């Protein structure tokens, strides 16, 4: 019996430890009892298994919904196969206890969750000042991050110092305010809800010509604990990526059932190993899931609860969440008007890929 569409074995992908030099036959029909691999069930269908040779050992996410465009691996398509994003079940965080925010040295508030996951809240008076710029390190190697550093920053009227993170990609997000960013002598206008890409070896400077302060965050991959503060702007600009700013564009938004996201900065758009995206979720609580990367989330609007297996904590606009590799989690939006968030992870891939 033939079929025009494969059977969905399950929506989420299968995490498999593969071995270099071994050949795998991925089930394309969805009928195999040995998912995600073939057991011969395709013989009654029009489908054939896909032969794939592992060129290196490691973990791979093999597609379980069988609708991926990136066979045999998950590309996030499973999130578009239903009208409602998968919500938390009774077992997700059933034993989670409510944790409190603790005051850190300097006045920031931090809530420690499972396995190095945490939420940090930084009042402006806790930031370090350099000229018209204030900044605070919210994620770094000292916090358990393996790949990325992140700072929250503000710029009042004037020009910020010239900053450079040598050897690292720097990805900026302008939360509010407007002005311009100078990258290696090239000037780009920036406004609220826009991402900015700064390539390795380049320096940048933020100019605020208005009365409203610019509120932003700076993400750096790989780690760079402190930036270089330069006396003048070096003439270094990677002309292979001429466009450096990306704002909200509805034509570039991707649906995930009743949610959406838009990649602002990523490997396809800017040739960077960092993915920065903005997303919107309705009043709901997602099912627990994991990623094969470190992730940081900044709450832009709306309130909610961050859940892990054993802990939970309230979150609000301005909070930064750090999620270590493979950390089980879900973000609940409790606001009737929904929640908007900024996400960033390294290495680059689709935000829709989870397991």
Image (cartoon, grey):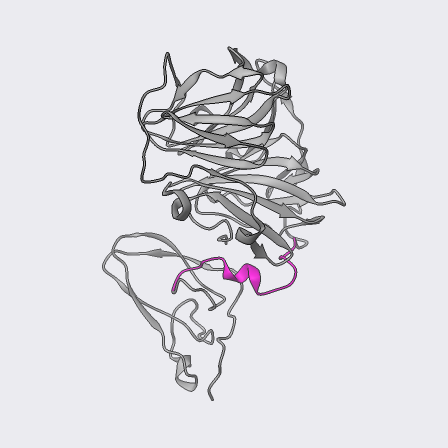
Horizontal side of 226 relative to 104 (left or right) equals left
- Counting from the top left corner in percent of width and height, residue 347 is at 39, 42
Residue at image point 50% right, 31% down:
189
Horizontal side of 145 relative to 93 (left or right) equals left
Q: Which residues are magenta?
A: 72-88
Residue 341 vertical position relative to residue 83 in the rendered view, above or below: above
Residue at image point 55% right, 53% down:
251
- Counting from the top left corner in percent of width and height, residue 257 is at 61, 59
> How many numbered markers are drawn?
0
- Counting from the top left corner in percent of width and height, residue 44 is at 43, 86
Horizontal side of 141 relative to 138 (left or right) equals left
Q: Quadrant of residue 243?
A: top left
Residue 95 vertical position relative to residue 123 in the rendered view, above or below: below
Query: In the depicted view, which residue is nearer to us: 307 or 259?
Result: 259
Q: Is residue 153 magenta?
A: no
Residue placed farthest to the right in the image?
A: 336
Residue placed farthest to the left in the image?
A: 21
């Amino acid at each position: 019996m033939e079929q025009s569409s494969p059977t969905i074995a399950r929506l989420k992908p299968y995490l498999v430890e593969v071995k270099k030099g071994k050949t795998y036959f991925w089930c394309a029909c969805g009928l195999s009892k040995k998912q995600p691999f073939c057991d011969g069930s395709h013989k009654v269908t029009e489908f054939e298994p896909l032969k794939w040779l592992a060129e290196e050992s490691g973990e791979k996410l093999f597609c379980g919904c069988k609708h991926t465009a990136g066979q045999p691996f998950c590309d996030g398509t499973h999130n578009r196969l239903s009208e409602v994003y998968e919500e938390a079940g009774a077992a997700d965080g059933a034993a989670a206890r409510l944790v409190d925010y603790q005051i850190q040295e300097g006045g920031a508030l931090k809530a420690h969750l499972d396995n190095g996951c945490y939420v940090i809240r930084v009042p402006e008076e806790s930031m370090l000042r350099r000229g018209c710029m204030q900044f605070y390190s919210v994620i770094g190697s000292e916090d358990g991050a393996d790949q990325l550093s992140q700072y929250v920053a503000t710029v009042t009227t004037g020009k910020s110092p010239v900053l450079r993170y040598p050897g690292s990609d720097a990805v900026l997000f302008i939360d509010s305010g407007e002005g311009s960013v100078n990258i290696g002598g090239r000037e780009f206008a920036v406004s609220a809800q826009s991402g900015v890409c700064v390539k390795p070896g380049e320096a940048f400077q933020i100019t605020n010509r208005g009365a409203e302060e610019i509120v932003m965050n700076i993400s750096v991959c790989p780690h760079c604990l402190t930036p270089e503060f330069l006396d003048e702007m070096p003439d270094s600009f990677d002309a292979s990526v001429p466009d450096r700013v990306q704002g909200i564009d509805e034509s570039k938004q991707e649906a995930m059932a009743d949610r959406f996201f838009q990649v602002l900065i990523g490997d396809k758009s800017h040739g960077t190993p960092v993915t920065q995206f903005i997303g919107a979720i309705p009043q709901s609580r997602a099912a627990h899931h994991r990623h094969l990367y470190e992730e940081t989330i900044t709450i832009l609007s709306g309130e909610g609860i961050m859940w892990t297996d054993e802990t939970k904590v309230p979150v609000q606009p301005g909070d930064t969440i750090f999620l270590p590799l493979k950390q089980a989690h879900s973000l609940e939006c409790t606001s009737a008007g929904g929640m908007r968030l900024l996400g960033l992870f390294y290495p680059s891939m689709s935000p829709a890929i989870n397991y």
